[in-house]
Amino acid sequence: MIPAAFEYARASSVEEASKLLSKFGEDAKVLAGGHSLIPLMRLRLAQPAALVDINGIKELDHIKEDGQKLRIGALTRHVTIHNSPVVKEKLPLLAEIASEVGDNQVRNMGTMGGVIAHADAAGDYPTLALILDAEIVTNKRTIPARDFFKDLFTTALGPDEVVTEVVFPVANGPHKYVKFRRRLFDWAIVGVAAQKMNGGWRIGLTNVGPTPVRAKAVEEALHQGAKPEEAAQHASDGLDPAGDLRASPEYKKHLARVLTKRAINQAEGRQ
Ligand SMILES: Cc1cc2nc3c(=O)[nH]c(=O)nc-3n(C[C@H](O)[C@H](O)[C@H](O)COP(=O)(O)OP(=O)(O)OC[C@H]3O[C@@H](n4cnc5c(N)ncnc54)[C@H](O)[C@@H]3O)c2cc1C
């Protein structure tokens, strides 16, 4: 299908992008990799009046070590994150997740900032950002991930706000992302991230609600000494996932429990 008509402008700096967004008004959208926005426009589920293309803003494409933090520029592509020796060393779970986003085409074009700003319930980076207490940096402020994801496809971003970086803590202990899907390149039906850091576990769930979920009851059970299979039974505590074509609510809750056990076991080198 062909998208509805829209205006187009290419920004060469973040300031210019923000000014263009203000000029075009609330119906303008940032264009990054285009791998979520363009399909929605072609289906006319999104009809932005204007697109502000940020692909020419080179300073948004970076991976920087900053003490115990890793700063990932908003325009950094999934493939760059996956191949980065720094990410592999300092936050290997992020490299692992990047390697499993979509297919080669998606990974060559899609960006960190795009996934975060799009806030799809099945997006993989938001779960990691939430459990690691990452920060979303914009041209105006820094937003903790726990305050950023408000609802399905809804974030704390204002109309002329541009994500510039996502800042993760360094974490290179035991880790695993288990993504359950029917075909290799599909989005997660349910995903589970497990990361050990500072002596405790951080556990997060993808696609079991409108926003990513931190499985605090599982973390607490592990902290109290429960075995992974016991702790994982708490993964569905408080969940009320929507059913969809691929899974009923009950099946998603079942997956949350099974995959949580699997993620913790695999992180610790067991099958
Ligand atoms: C076949 C297919 C499979 C996929 N599988 C997965 C998957 O398994 N896991 C997964 O996580 N994702 C998956 N994706 C989505 C993919 O990762 C997209 O790249 C991503 O959702 C959006 O990133 P983008 O750079 O393409 O953003 P765009 O499509 O350009 O933009 C998406 C939204 O974010 C906004 N935006 C983008 N960048 C910024 C910014 N810097 N500041 C403010 N707003 C911004 C845009 O205005 C738009 O509303 C898949 C996509 C496809 C087509």
Image (tube, helix red, strand yellow):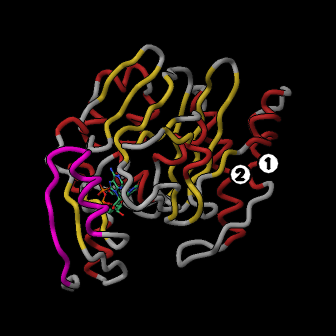
For badge 1, the amino acid type reads Gln
| Residue drawn where x is 60% and y is 48% of the image | 147
Q: Helix, strand or loop at disc 2?
A: helix
Q: Distance between the residues labelled 2 and 1?
A: 5 Å
Mark 1: few/some/many CA within 10 Å (<14, 14-19, 20+):
some
| Residue drawn where x is 83% and y is 31% of the image | 226
Q: Is residue 271 visible?
A: no
Q: In this view, does 145 lie to the left or right of 78?
A: right
For badge 2, the amino acid type reads Arg
Instruction: Looking at the image, tell me whether mark 2 or mark 1 is earlier in sequence order.
Output: 1
- Which segment is the magenta one? 5-24
The answer to whether the residue labelled 2 contacts the one labelled 1, judged by CB atoms less than 8 Å apart, is yes
Asked if ligand 1 lies within 8 A of label 2, the reply is: no
Q: Which of 258 and 60 is in front in this view?
A: 60
Image quarter of the C terminus = top right
Quadrant of the rendered image holding ligand 1: bottom left
